[in-house]
Amino acid sequence: MSAKHPRVLVVANQKGGVGKTTTAINLGTALAAIGEPTLVLDIDPQGNASTGLGIHRSERKLTAYDVLVGATKLGDAVIPTKIPHLSLVPSTVDLSGAELELIDLPRRNFRLKDALEEYSVHGACPFTYVLIDCPPSLTLLTVNAMAAADAVIVPLQCEFFALEGLSQLLKTIELVRANLNPSLEIQGIILTMFDKRNRLSDQVAADVRANMGEMVYNTVIPRNVRISEAPSHGLPALVYDLRCPGSQAYIKLAGELVQRERARLAA
């Protein structure tokens, strides 16, 4: 995997509250911890990934908004986090207005793709992975992310309507593949908020595995209060409490992701 051309993975689900931002933050931290330089690109106007990585709003001088509207180059918006080998392109609420501005700009669906490609070619991109954290809806921001990505990582909460939400997302991915990015693939589906005391979690996990097969990661992310607490301290769970079950699960998940990527390259 060339250092100049990172593997771009979009963390997406049109449904909110599934652990999307939590996955982007902690998977990014885990990848960095195992020696894979990683960039988290926050394109959610709520900016939760930026907050969860300890970047205060006053520190967000250049953001994903500036990149998308062409006011700055992507490399100039990259800032280091407290975690070694993990960097961030932050987001602010300004992004919510970018939707309207993008409509009138050339290549409106490919603004992020063009910015990433320019960074990779001319900026000697130092990252192995770029994780894009999307809004929990199908907007022009999400479309930009999917048009720019190599593959989609889908966090899926172990709840009753999980498969219904997944089918909607799969249709969206197919539309993007047909119209904007023919090489887009699903990198994997991550079962999140798994509660081993709840029979519903087991049933949902079994149903998703029966329908999606090897696409579903073996690692499941448990429901864990320490994961929920960590963002309020501006820390990934892995830094806040490395030993908690949630942190250990994300470390295991990062290892499984790297194995999948190596197998893909070897195929």
Image: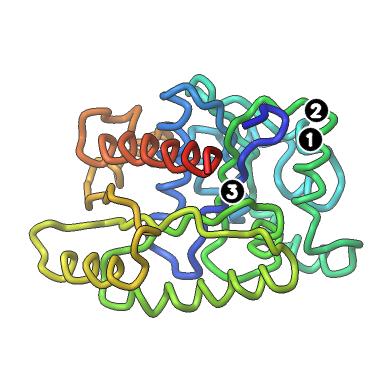
- Dot label at residue 119: 1
- On screen, residue 11 versus residue 106, left or right, reads left
* Distance from the alpha carbon under mark 3 to that under mark 2: 19 Å
Measured as percent of width and height from the top left, residue 54 is found at: 49, 32
Q: Secondary structure at mark 1?
A: helix
Given the image, on which type of amino acid does mark 2 rest?
Gly
Given the image, on which type of amino acid does mark 1 rest?
Tyr
Q: Earlier in the sequence, mark 3 or mark 2?
A: 2
Q: Secondary structure at mark 2?
A: loop
Quickly name the residue at label 3.
132
Marks 3/2 in contact by CB < 8 Å: the verdict is: no
Marks 1/2 in contact by CB < 8 Å: the verdict is: yes
Question: Where is residue 252, by image quadrant?
Answer: top left
Quadrant for the N terminus in the image: top right
Q: Residue at x 29, y 43 (%)?
A: 227
Tell me, what colour scheme is on the image? rainbow
Measured as percent of width and height from the top left, residue 63 is found at: 71, 42
Measured as percent of width and height from the top left, residue 124 is found at: 77, 25
Quickly name the residue at label 2.
123
Relative to the observer, which residue lies in front, 152 or 86?
A: 152
Q: Is residue 193 above or below residue 103?
A: above
Q: Residue at x 69, y 32 (%)?
A: 78
- On screen, residue 36 versus residue 120, left or right, reads left
Question: Where is residue 61, by image quadrant?
Answer: top right
Given the image, on which type of amino acid does mark 3 rest?
Ile
Marks 1/3 in contact by CB < 8 Å: the verdict is: no
